[in-house]
Image: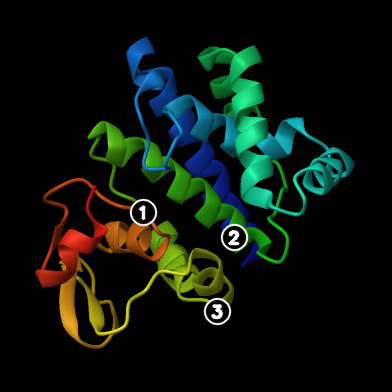
Amino acid sequence: MGTDIRRLIAAERRELADLLSGLPPRAWDAPSLCAGWRVREVVAHLTLPYRHSGPRVLAGLVAARGNFDRLADRLARRDTASLTAEQLTACLRDNAEHPWRPPGGGFEGALSHDVIHGMDITVALGIDRPIPGERLRVLLDGALSPRARRYFGVELDGIELRADDVDWSFGSGTPLTGAAQDLVLVLSGRRLPEGRLRGEPSARFRH
């Protein structure tokens, strides 16, 4: 499984780098699904593990009073001020096989991190990029883990998430229907553009 998941990670990073290299310059300054971040801040965050050492991140975390989201925002904004779109894309491509793993998340967490942030870019830009089934299954399993549910804290009481493209559902109650990869974004605390979700609860998860 370790070798297989690392193959999926490398493929995801290379494909995303190919996509980024084809974006027009204005797209890099377009808003992403990550609140307050443009596309370029998302890519800076994706490549953070390859440019910042563990001790440096820990020191930054202390300065951010233990708030990783605050640290991630500071680093993303600092890095985009000094790195071009071409440099950020090259960093992602050159580190396709980098063994980084999020603390406690393993390689499955690394794949989820890359794919979800990739969707933060493509969905916001209106780019149709289906996630391959092997990768999507890892995301669906990971998004339901107790660790992920605690981190994102999405309130889903009384809602059943129901995929309309694969055999997958979660929860019980009023159906919220959409593509499985869009439901992963819901579980990850994202608000999606109009038309990607259906059902009475959809307004709660729209921009």
Q: Distance between the residues labelled 3 and 2?
A: 13 Å
Label 3, secondary structure: give it.
helix
Observer able to see residue 24 = no
Q: In which quarter of the image is residue 136?
A: bottom left
Q: In this view, does 148 lie to the left or right of 199?
A: right
The x and y percentages for residue 198 are 11, 63
Above or below, 39 against 129 in this view is above
Q: Quadrant of residue 74?
A: top right
Q: Which label was assigned to residue 109? A: 2
Residue that numbered label 3 is attached to: 146
User: Is there CB contact under 8 Å for labels 3 and 2?
Assistant: no
The x and y percentages for residue 194 are 14, 48
Residue that numbered label 1 is attached to: 190
The x and y percentages for residue 14 are 51, 34
The x and y percentages for residue 23 are 35, 19
Q: Earlier in the sequence, mark 1 or mark 3?
A: 3
Amino acid type at image mark 3: Pro
Observer able to see residue 140 = yes
Towards the viewer: 196 or 2: 196
Amino acid type at image mark 1: Arg
Q: Which of marks 1 and 2 is in front?
A: 1
Q: Distance between the residues labelled 1 and 3?
A: 18 Å
Residue pictured at 64% horizontal, 44% vertical: 70
Residue pictured at 34% horizontal, 24% vertical: 30
Q: Is residue 115 left or right of residue 71?
A: left
